[in-house]
Image: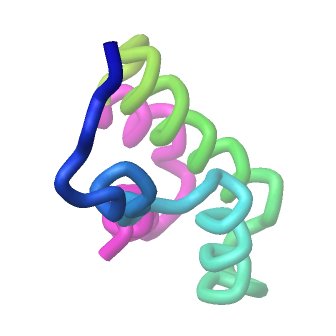
Amino acid sequence: MTWKLKDNKILSTPTESKGCTVDEVIDKLRMKYKGKIDDQILVSITYDVLIKHMTEKKISLDEIRRKYSSVSNIDEVINEVLVLAKGR
């Protein structure tokens, strides 16, 4: 039995994917908050939001806010990570 397709383009058309990697988010945050927030804290916040919250569902955003309450603009940083993760 053989298959005949009307149009071969549908098989090879790539799908567009909007999003970014953890490294891309960290790099963008480092540029934006350079000198304001320590790099290690930015990495930890990004990991907690992207991996522990969005992927593993092990921690809530409120828990992240409490954990990093010493960061003066933690809500802004969390929001920035979420926006970058959505690829907007």
Q: Give the residue at x 44% y 57%.
A: 12
Residue 75 pos. (x, y %): 33, 60
- Residue lying furthest front in this view? 1
Image quadrant where residue 58 sits: top left
Image quadrant where residue 82 sits: bottom left
Image quadrant where residue 61 sits: top left
**Most foreground residue, 17 or 75:** 17
**Most foreground residue, 78 or 27:** 27
Residue 59 pos. (x, y %): 40, 19
Magenta residue span: 61-88
In magenta stretch: residue 50: no
Dominant SS of magenta comes to helix
**Most foreground residue, 84 or 72:** 84
Residue 87 pos. (x, y %): 37, 68
Q: Is residue 34 left or right of residue 20?
A: right
- Vertical arrangement, residue 5 with respect to residue 80, above or below: above
Q: Give the residue at x 30% y 76%.
A: 88
What kind of colouring is applied to the model shown?
Answer: rainbow
- Vertical arrangement, residue 36 with respect to residue 80, above or below: below
> Looking at the image, can residue 74 be seen?
no
Q: Is residue 29 left or right of residue 9?
A: right
Q: Give the residue at x 64% y 82%.
A: 33
> Looking at the image, can residue 52 be seen?
yes
Q: Is residue 60 left or right of residue 48?
A: left
- Vertical arrangement, residue 84 with respect to residue 48, above or below: below
Residue 1 pos. (x, y %): 32, 12
